[in-house]
Amino acid sequence: MTTSPGIHRSNEPAEVPEELREARATIDNIDAALVHLLAERFRCTKKVGVLKARLDLPPSDPGREDRQVERLRALAEDAGLDPVFAEKFLKFIVEEVIRHHEDIADSLAGEGAPTGA
Amino acid sequence: MTTSPGIHRSNEPAEVPEELREARATIDNIDAALVHLLAERFRCTKKVGVLKARLDLPPSDPGREDRQVERLRALAEDAGLDPVFAEKFLKFIVEEVIRHHEDIADSLAGEGAPTGA
């Protein structure tokens, strides 16, 4: 046995070829980084949601989203990522953010924040 | 005017409140990091796709995916990210990866790689 308990790669079955095992270890490290960046992104959009609800701004902002799409497509092209996928990825995240913003607006309204004023 | 041409935040219309503008600058930086990590992840899964096609392994590997889901849900919980979202996110990416792997397998088959041997 060349694997030790506690080393992440030991999650892979013994029959997995070494080259595949190595690539998967890199993918797992990237995924951990992605999860932590997404967590930070949602912390930030949560603050934006509270701010938008207080300022009575709509949860969705199509002008902002168009600018984000343009920018991410350009960054994706530079990085060698399919810009169509980058756009789909942004839409996937923004849908979740809008859901959060609607929840925040609902819970602020439920707390007796002024409405219709 | 406090904005200068070339500074990223100048993309935001002048009427956007400063606090929102600041949060959006952070979100844009995080998104650039996400795009670059995704680009690197697909570079890595592309190599995996070639390897799997050569070793005649199936594009999808349910056991591996189950282990990834478990791990990412745990990482998400530690980071304060909704584990349900983390799981959806992984599925979203894996769908794209499997599409790439199928393309790679098809193009290797088209190149006259041995089949049925």
Image (cartoon, coloured by chain):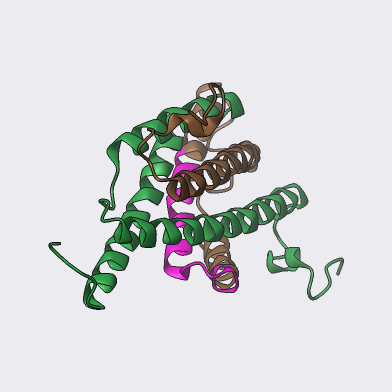
Chain colours: A green, B brown
Q: Position of residue A12 (x, y in %)?
A: 69, 64
Seen from this angle, which residue lies furthest right? A2
**Residue A33 seen in render:** yes
Give the prevailing secondary structure in the magenta stretch. helix
Give coordinates of residue B33: x percent, y percent. Answer: 60, 42
Residue A93 as seen in the image, left or right of residue A32: left
What's drawn in magenta, residue-wise?
B76-99
Q: Nearer the viewer, residue A8 or A43?
A: A43
Q: Is residue B101 left or right of residue B92?
A: right
Question: At 57% from the left edge and 42% from the top edge, which residue is drawn?
Answer: B29
> In this rendering, would B29 be left or right of B84?
right
**Where residue B39 appears, x then y in whole percent?**
59, 37
What residue is at 30 percent from the left and 43 percent from the top? A61
Q: Is residue B53 visible?
A: no
Q: Is residue B86 magenta?
A: yes
Quadrant in which residue A104 is drawn: bottom left
Coordinates of residue A29 in the picture (x, y in percent)? 69, 55
Image quadrant where one finds the C terminus of chain B: top right
